[in-house]
Image (cartoon, rainbow, N blue to C red):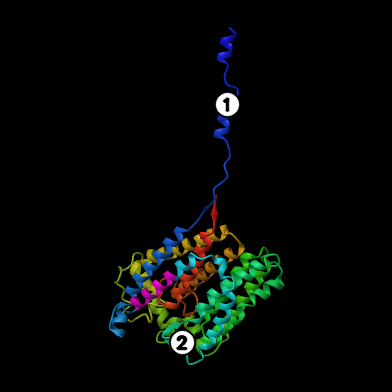
Amino acid sequence: MSSRNHSASPPVNSRQSIKSKNFVKKKPVKKSYFDYSLLFLIIFMLAFGLLMLYSTSSYNAAIEFGSSTYYLRKQLQATILGLIAMFIVANMNYRKFVWTGVVGYIVSIIMIFLVLSPLGYEANGARRWIRIAGVSVQPAEVAKISLILLLAVIISNNRQNIRKISITAKIFALCIPMAGSILIITKNMSSALIIVGIAFVMLFIASPKYSHYIILGIAGVSVILVYLFTGSGFRSERVAAWLDPESYAQGKGYQTLQSLYAIGSGGLTGKGLGQSVQKLGYVPEAQNDMVFSIICEELGLFGGIAVILLFLLMIWRFMIIANNAEDLYGSMIVIGVMAHISIQVILNIAVVTNVIPNTGITLPFISYGGTSVVLLLAEMGLVLSVSKRIRLE
């Protein structure tokens, strides 16, 4: 009896050993993250942009340069260079660019003043470029990425004092020399507005106190309206053409009217890819500022909305990366890039649809422009670099 009880007794520590095997907490493994969704969006937008650029520019390119692929080839070269820059920057630690903002800020202002020198040259009635060793560069595009990097450093270093209006005003004042020189020297109001908008959005998001930003925003809009409506000559004529484009159909209102005709004739589904009529010399420089109107004519209202949704998806990915960035510096870089692209898209579509006065502004990734696409892709490289250093458990 005693031997039976002894042999049938269960092992004392069997359940404890099972628990110890099944319920031991392991340390979470941290994995690096890379935003492939954003990368796919970038590549898709570039491919779509090249397709629409060829469709839009082939007629004018054949007449002016004897080759229907002239603009496509130049944009493709810039896109390849930009992709190389994007992948190099994406594989670098974004913290290595801390001092790049200071250097870029100074260099970009010098480049803006060089527009007045023999290096500067005029195209389509605007003197906004400089040519160095046969390569044309638009200083305003260099200024945008430089300001983003500079403000990201300064805001991250002043995170405790950013709520003070005196500190905010000093940081915001850094954009004034850039915006002022772009506006006065190159007469490029749209780029000046983007510079100011980038600074405003970065400070607004970084600050926990929003009241003085509302006042600053109202004051800024008031200054812009006063500047537009109290001007004379070229500026006043442009505002008048915006208010009543039909009365200026042979002048400043011509491009806007042709753009609206293109959007209206496209209807819901469009005339079909390559079937635009307005691109056949009716819309001046259709491959630049007015490419969105040709998209609406060929792909219809659905095509135009699809493009807007793609940009919204891109902005959503920026927000995800900014919220999960490893530090405030990385988050501010992404916020600056998001502000740049979103403001530029809004301004371009607003101009094409005559919501605001006509001003030269390109549609990111789609409009023709070598400097723009190279530096935009460099900005994308910075965003991907920030995303690559996010650690997931």
- x%, y% of residue 58? 30, 77
Magenta segment: does it hold 72?
yes
Residue 364 is tagged as none
Q: Which type of secondary structure does the marked residue at label 1 adopt?
A: helix
- Part of the protein shown in magenta: 71-84
Residue at 54% x, 48% y: name it.
Answer: 29
Answer with mark 1 or mark 2, whichever residue precedes in sequence: 1
Quadrant containing the N terminus is top right
Q: Nearer the viewer, mark 1 or mark 2?
A: 1
Residue 161 lies in quadrant: bottom right
Q: Which residue is mark 1?
A: 15
- The answer to whether residue 326 of the structure is visible from this angle is yes
Residue type marked 1: Arg
Residue type marked 2: Ala
> Is the residue under label 2 in contact with that under label 1 (CB below 8 Å)?
no
Q: Which residue is mark 2?
A: 126
Residue 99 lies in quadrant: bottom right
Q: Residue furthest bottom?
A: 118
